[in-house]
Image (tube, rainbow, N blue to C red):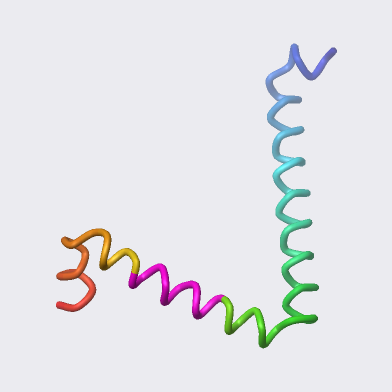
Amino acid sequence: GAAMISPCMRFTFMLLLVFVLILELSTAGLVWKHAYGELFLIFLSDFIKEQICRGILEIRDSFRFVFS
């Protein structure tokens, strides 16, 4: 209907959808952090360390930027 004709309505609808999506993700993150705060912190730090090490091993040129 009107949303397909009016670009302004489409843009407003997309902004509303993005806002609701961000709100849902942040709420889920806060609930998860509250319930499993320490486990999440350990998981996140291990994941970041693993990604850094994997990046260093896979991309040889990145080694000089990380450890120079």
User: Would you say 40 lies left or right of 19 here?
Assistant: left
User: Would you say 60 lies left or right of 41 here?
Assistant: left
Query: Against 2, is 18 above or below?
Result: below
Q: Quadrant of residue 68?
A: bottom left
- Point out residue 46 in the picture as x, y percentages from the top left corner: 49, 79
Q: Residue at x 23, y 73 (%)?
A: 66
Q: Residue furthest bottom?
A: 38
Query: Against 1, is 25 above or below?
Result: below
Question: Foreground: 19 or 24?
Answer: 24
Query: Against 22, is 3 above or below?
Result: above
Quadrant housing the N terminus: top right
User: Would you say 42 lies left or right of 46 here?
Assistant: right
Residue 45 sits inside the magenta stretch:
yes
Q: Which residues are magenta?
A: 44-53
Question: Foreground: 27 or 5?
Answer: 27
Q: Residue at x 72, y 78 (%)?
A: 33
- Point out residue 48 in the picture as x, y percentages from the top left corner: 45, 73
Question: Foreground: 42 or 19?
Answer: 42
Q: Residue at x 68, y 30 (%)?
A: 11
Q: Residue at x 66, y 83 (%)?
A: 39
Residue 48 sits inside the magenta stretch:
yes
User: Would you say 26 lies left or right of 68 here?
Assistant: right
Q: Residue furthest right?
A: 1
Helix, strand or loop for the magenta stretch, by majority: helix
